[in-house]
Image (spheres, rainbow, N blue to C red):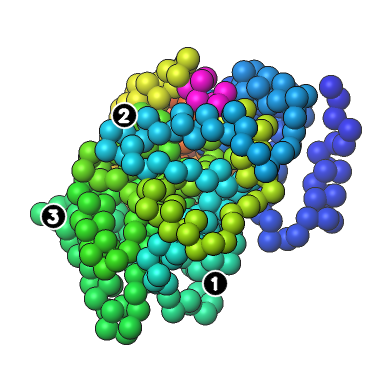
C-alpha cells in the first residue's frame, strides 16, 4: 500500500498540529514507520529496523492471533460495559495463577481501561480508601504516569522542572540502585540500608503529622535507569510501610508478563516471601491495544467498594480489549515467550558483557545490577571509577545505531543507559546483530565523540 503522505509532509503537518511538548524519537531525522511485524518495523521506503525497545508490542508487533481475536470480537460486540461478560471474567482469572502461590489472595481485579496512568491513579485511590491515610512514598527517578496525581509521584519528570511546587504529601526515597545509587554493590547490606531510608521517611512524616497510605515502586525501575533492587529490599520496605498502616503498590506496567524470564511478575524476583498489596499492569497486556488492570487483595478491594462510590470507566473491561488480553496470554504460552525471554536475555547479557571488556565506555551490564531476561540496561560512563555518565555519547550511539537499522533508546536520570526491552519474540540472532552493530558503533568509523570519552577513562 502506498503512503498517502510523504515523510516531509508528515513531519510538516505534525509540527503544525501537534503540541510542541509531544516529543518524538530522533527529532533531527524522525522515522516514518508504516508497518511492523514481530520484532521488526518498516519505514516508508520498506527499510527494516530491529526493534529493541518496544515493550508494548509484547508478543510481537501485529501478532496474527492477537489481531484476529480483536477483529472477531469487534464484529460481535464492541462495547457494553454494564454487564459481566464471559471474556471479562477470564482475563482476571487467567492473571491469578501467574501471580504466584502466595499471591493467590491478590484476588480482585479492576480492568481499569485505556491508559496505565488510570491504573496507577486507581491504585492510589484504593490505597487511600483502605488506609484512610494520604501520604505516598515514591522512589527517586520513578515514573508512574502523566495525570496530576501521578506527576506528583514521578520524580523522573521533576528533574525536567526543578522549580515545580512539590506536593507535601509525597515523599521521595532513594532509588535502590546498587550501581550508582547511595549504597552500592560493595555495601555489606544495601537492601537494608535502602529500606531503612524508607523507614526514616515514615518516621519524619509521622513527626509532621503525616500518615502513610502507600509506598509505590516499579518492581524494577525502567525510566529510572533499569534498576534492579537488591533482594530483600521490598520485604523490608513492606514491613515498615505496613507497620505504619500503609500498603505496597507494585507498578508492573513495563516489567510484568514474563519479561524478566525467570518469573511472570518482576516483583517475584525478590522471593516468595514478598507479595504487594496492589499490582498495576498495562503495556504488555494488550500488545499495543489499550488495556490495563489493577489487582488488589480482597480487603483493599472491599474497602473501596464499601465506601459506597461505584467504580465505572467507559472503556474499562470492554469486550475487545478483553479478547485481545486473552489472546496475548495464549500466545505467550503457545510460543513459550517467557522461556524465550530467559534464554535470549542470558545470551544478550553475555554478549554485552564481552563488549564491556572491549569498550571502556560500557560501565556495566551485569545481570545483577542492570537487568533480567529481556529487560537489560547498558550504562555508558566516561569513567568506570567516578561513573561520570556518558550522556552525549549515549545519544550519539543510539543515533548511529538507527543508521545501522537498530532501534534502541537511552534513559535513566542521566539519559546514559541504553535500554533493551524488545518484543519477547526477539531471537538470539537478533541479539547477535544488535550487539555486532553496537560493537561497530563503539569501535567507531568516525570516532570523534568516543575518542574523548575513551581517553577519559584511561
Ligand atoms: N507506569 C509506568 C512504569 C510507565 O512506564 C508508564 C508509561 N510509560 C505509566 C505507568 C503510564 O502509562 P500511560 O502512558 O499509559 O498513562
Asked whether 454 or 263 is in front, the reply is: 263
- For residue 328: magenta? yes
Disc 2 is placed on an element classified as: loop
The answer to whether mark 2 is within 8 Å of ligand 1 is no
**Which residue is rendered at x = 81% and y = 38% of the image?**
7
**As drawn, which residue projects farthest toward the top?**
334
Q: CA distance from mark 2 to mark 1?
A: 38 Å
**Which residue is rendered at x = 73% and y = 37% of the image?**
79
- For residue 1: magenta? no
Q: Which residue is mark 2?
A: 262
**Which residue is rendered at x = 58% and y = 67% of the image?**
148
Q: Are marks 3 and 2 in contact (CB under 8 Å)?
A: no
Asked whether 370 or 217 is in front, the reply is: 217
Q: Are marks 2 and 1 in contact (CB under 8 Å)?
A: no
Magenta stretch, residue numbers: 326-332
Q: Which residue is mark 1?
A: 161
Work out whether 143 lies above or below 267. Answer: below
Of tags 3 and 2, the one toward the viewer is: 2
Amino acid at each position: 500500500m502506498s503512503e498517502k503522505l510523504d515523510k516531509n509532509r508528515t513531519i510538516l503537518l505534525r509540527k503544525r498540529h501537534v503540541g510542541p511538548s509531544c516529543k518524538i524519537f530522533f527529532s533531527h531525522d524522525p522515522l516514518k514507520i508504516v508497518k511492523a511485524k514481530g520484532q521488526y518495523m518498516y519505514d516508508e521506503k520498506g527499510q527494516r529496523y530491529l526493534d529493541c525497545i518496544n515493550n508494548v508490542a509484547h508478543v510481537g508487533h501485529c501478532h496474527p492471533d492477537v489481531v484476529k481475536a480483536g477483529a472477531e470480537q469487534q464484529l460481535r460486540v464492541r462495547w457494553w460495559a454494564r454487564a459481566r461478560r464471559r471474556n471479562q471474567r477470564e482475563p482476571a482469572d487467567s492473571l491469578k495463577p501467574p501471580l504466584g502461590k502466595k499471591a493467590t489472595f491478590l484476588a480482585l481485579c479492576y480492568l481499569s481501561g485505556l491508559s496505565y496512568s488510570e491504573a496507577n491513579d486507581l491504585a492510589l485511590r484504593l490505597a487511600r480508601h483502605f488506609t484512610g491515610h494520604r501520604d505516598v512514598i515514591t522512589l527517586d527517578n520513578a515514573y508512574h504516569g502523566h495525570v496530576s496525581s501521578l506527576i506528583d509521584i514521578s520524580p523522573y519528570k521533576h528533574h525536567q522542572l526543578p522549580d515545580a511546587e512539590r506536593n507535601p504529601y509525597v515523599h521521595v526515597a532513594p532509588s535502590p540502585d546498587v550501581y550508582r545509587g547511595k549504597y552500592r554493590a560493595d555495601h555489606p547490606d544495601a537492601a537494608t540500608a535502602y529500606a531503612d531510608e524508607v523507614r526514616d521517611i515514615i518516621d519524619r512524616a509521622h513527626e509532621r503529622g503525616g500518615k502513610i497510605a502507600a509506598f509505590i515502586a516499579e518492581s524494577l525501575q525502567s525510566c529510572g535507569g533499569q534498576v534492579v533492587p537488591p533482594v530483600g529490599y521490598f520485604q523490608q520496605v513492606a514491613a515498615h510501610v505496613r507497620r505504619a498502616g500503609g500498603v505496597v503498590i507494585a507498578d508492573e506496567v513495563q516489567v510484568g508478563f514474563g519479561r524478566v524470564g525467570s518469573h511472570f511478575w518482576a516483583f517475584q524476583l525478590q522471593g516468595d516471601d514478598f507479595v504487594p498489596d496492589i499490582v498495576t499492569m498495562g503495556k504488555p497486556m494488550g500488545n499495543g491495544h489499550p488495556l490495563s488492570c489493577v489487582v488488589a487483595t480482597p480487603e483493599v478491594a472491599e474497602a473501596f467498594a464499601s465506601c459506597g462510590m461505584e467504580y465505572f470507566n467507559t472503556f474499562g473491561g470492554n469486550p475487545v480489549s478483553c479478547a485481545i488480553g486473552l489472546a496475548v496470554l495464549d500466545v505467550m504460552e503457545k510460543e513459550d515467550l517467557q522461556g524465550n525471554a530467559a534464554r535470549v536475555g542470558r545470551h544478550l547479557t553475555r554478549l554485552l558483557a564481552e563488549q564491556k571488556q572491549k569498550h571502556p565506555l560500557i560501565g556495566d551490564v551485569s545481570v545483577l545490577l542492570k537487568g533480567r531476561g529481556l529487560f537489560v540496561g547498558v550504562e555508558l560512563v566516561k569513567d568506570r571509577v567516578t561513573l561520570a555518565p556518558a550522556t552525549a555519547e549515549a545519544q550519539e550511539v543510539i543515533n548511529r545505531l538507527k543508521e545501522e537499522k537498530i532501534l534502541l533508546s537511552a534513559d535513566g536520570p542521566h539519559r546514559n543507559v541504553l535500554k533493551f526491552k524488545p518484543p519477547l519474540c526477539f531471537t538470539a540472532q537478533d541479539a547477535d546483530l544488535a550487539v555486532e552493530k553496537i560493537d561497530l558503533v563503539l569501535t567507531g568509523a568516525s570516532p570523534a565523540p568516543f575518542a574523548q570519552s575513551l581517553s577519559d577513562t584511561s
